Image: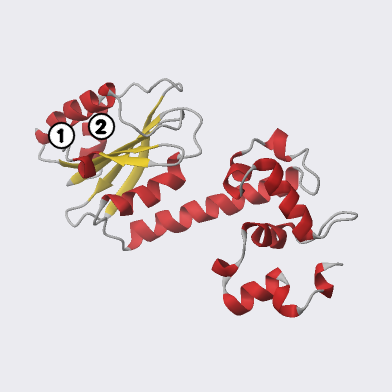
């Protein structure tokens, strides 16, 4: 049976409008995005099959274009739309931080950083530059490396912090391996950066490691 023949309260779009997007399953959300099914499958059935093949909605969004393009009901146009939706989500959170949000805890920073770094397939070292009230001035990805690590240059970090007139910074990097546990090298570079920034009276509030399913905060661990 086609979705438009379902009772109104069961149709994903009507359910979203009446009860809110948070009440929809991953398959229902994807079905709204797909809009139509294919021969023999409603949009809901197609969405369920896609998610079953990919593992989850997040894993679908992480797939490369060549994988998504060969899935029934998708293709280059749908891939572009998926990536646009993901980027809209990133910018929604980022612009909210720039406009008014004060970073009060490591949770605030982690929620932002997950969207920025979790999808990266290589290691990236980034900084959140903050003002005296811990409002975000700028987020910058400063160094990129291979999956094994990134080269981080303290002088450049200090230079960027001074350029943005930052009063404090939060460091962040991802572990493409998925394990968010900080390495000895992570701890050493953090200590070096803290000392370098201390010479110009800029505080280091945290260093956050973004993994596959978890994140790690140096501040929460009591390492700063």
Q: Is residue 166 visible?
A: no
Residue at position x 72%, y 74% in the image: 10
Q: Within 10 Å of the Cα at label 1, are there few (<14), some (14-19), or many (20+) other Cα atoms?
A: many
For this view, does 65 lie left or right of residue 95? right
Residue at position x 64%, y 35% in the image: 64
Foreground of the two, 121 or 178: 178
Asked if labels 2 and 1 touch by Cβ distance under 8 angstroms, the answer is: yes
Nearer the N terminus, badge 1 or badge 2? 2
Reading the image, the residue beneath label 2 is 157
Q: Name the disc covering residue 118, or none.
A: none
The residue lying furthest to the right in this view is 39
Which part of the image, by quadrant, shows the C terminus? Answer: top left
From the viewer's perspective, is residue 218 above or below residue 106? Answer: above
For this view, does 87 lie left or right of residue 70? left
SS for callout 1: helix
From the viewer's perspective, is residue 213 above or below residue 125? Answer: below
Which part of the image, by quadrant, shows the N terminus? Answer: bottom right
From the viewer's perspective, is residue 204 above or below residue 4? Answer: above
For this view, does 76 lie left or right of residue 172? right
Residue at position x 26%, y 42% in the image: 170
Residue 206 screen position, x and y as percent: 23, 42
Residue 158 screen position, x and y as percent: 21, 32
For this view, does 36 lie left or right of residue 188? right
Q: Is residue 108 visible?
A: yes
Foreground of the two, 49 or 115: 49
Foreground of the two, 187 or 203: 187
Residue 78 screen position, x and y as percent: 72, 49
Reading the image, the residue beneath label 1 is 197
Label total for image: 2
């Amino acid at each position: 049976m086609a979705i438009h023949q379902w009772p109104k309260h069961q149709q994903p779009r009507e359910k979203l409008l009446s009860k809110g997007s948070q009440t929809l399953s991953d398959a229902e959300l994807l079905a709204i995005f797909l809009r139509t099914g294919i021969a023999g499958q409603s949009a809901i059935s197609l969405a369920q099959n896609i998610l079953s093949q990919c593992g989850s909605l997040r894993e679908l969004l992480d797939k490369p274009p060549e994988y998504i393009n060969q899935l029934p009901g998708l293709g280059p146009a749908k891939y572009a739309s998926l990536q646009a939706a993901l980027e809209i989500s990133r910018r929604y959170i980022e612009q909210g931080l720039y406009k008014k949000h004060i970073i009060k805890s490591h949770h605030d920073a982690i929620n932002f950083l997950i969207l920025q770094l979790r999808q990266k397939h290589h290691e990236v070292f980034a900084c959140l530059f903050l003002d005296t009230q811990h409002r975000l001035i700028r987020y910058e990805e400063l160094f990129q490396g291979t999956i094994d690590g990134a080269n981080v240059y303290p002088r450049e970090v200090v230079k960027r912090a001074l350029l943005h007139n930052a009063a404090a910074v939060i460091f962040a990097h991802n572990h493409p391996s998925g394990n968010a546990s900080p390495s000895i090298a992570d701890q050493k570079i953090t200590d070096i950066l803290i000392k370098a920034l201390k010479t110009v009276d800029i505080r280091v509030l945290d260093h956050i490691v973004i993994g596959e399913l978890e994140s790690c905060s140096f501040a929460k661990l009591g390492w700063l």
